[in-house]
């Protein structure tokens, strides 16, 4: 059974940083998505199985960095220069295929989510 456990969310002020972590039960291609109240789930970042390729949503490019530690089956999302519009529940997602994708429909497994709130 695939398990994904996110951590690291919290309440911060605009301009602050946070680092989210997602521990997986095994090694997968990983992605981060977020969902704000009343909005659809949005792609944030993805990293390939090897870690060689990364992708970012337009709204977070230059501010967020995705990385992974394959020895720990863990993926990270470093979030800098946070804005109030980054407020959302952040979800970790995984897929068995080694190529990363920005499409939420192509991820098979999801974590329970972690809340990130950015105050102005």
Image: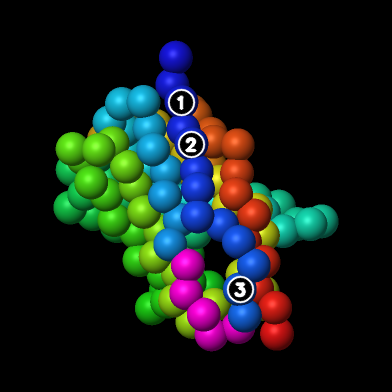
Q: Position of residue 96 (x, y in %)?
A: 34, 27
Q: Which residue is mark 1?
A: 3
Work out how far the residue at label 1 is from the one at label 2, CA to CA, in angstroms.
7 Å
At x 38%, y 32%, the residue is 24
Disc 3 versus disc 1: nearer the observer: 3
The mark nearer the N terminus, 3 or 1, is: 1
Residue 5 is tagged as 2
- Residue 12 — which label? 3
- Tell me where residue 109 appears, x and y as whole percent: 49, 29
Name the side, left or right, on which 69 lies relative to 45. left
Q: Quadrant of the C terminus?
A: bottom right
Q: Quadrant of the rendered structure where residue 34 is?
A: bottom right
Residue extending furthest toward the right = 38
**Residue count near mark 1 (Cα–Cα under 10 Å), binned few <14, some 14–19, many ≥20:** some
Vertical order, 89 against 110 (above or below):
below
Determine whether label 1 and label 2 are within 8 Å by CB: yes
The magenta segment is: 14-18
| N-terminal-most mark, 2 or 3 | 2
The residue depicted at 43 percent of the width and 62 percent of the height is: 19
């Amino acid at each position: 059974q695939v398990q994904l456990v996110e951590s690291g969310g919290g309440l911060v002020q605009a301009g602050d940083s946070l680092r989210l972590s997602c521990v997986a039960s095994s090694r997968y291609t990983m992605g981060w998505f977020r969902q704000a109240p009343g909005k659809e789930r949005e792609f944030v970042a993805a990293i390939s199985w090897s870690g060689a390729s990364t992708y970012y949503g337009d709204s977070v490019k230059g501010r967020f960095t995705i990385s992974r530690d394959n020895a720990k089956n863990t993926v990270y999302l470093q979030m800098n220069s946070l804005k109030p519009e980054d407020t959302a529940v952040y979800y970790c997602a995984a897929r068995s295929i080694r190529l990363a994708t920005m499409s939420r429909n192509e991820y098979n497994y999801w974590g329970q989510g972690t809340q990130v709130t950015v105050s102005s």
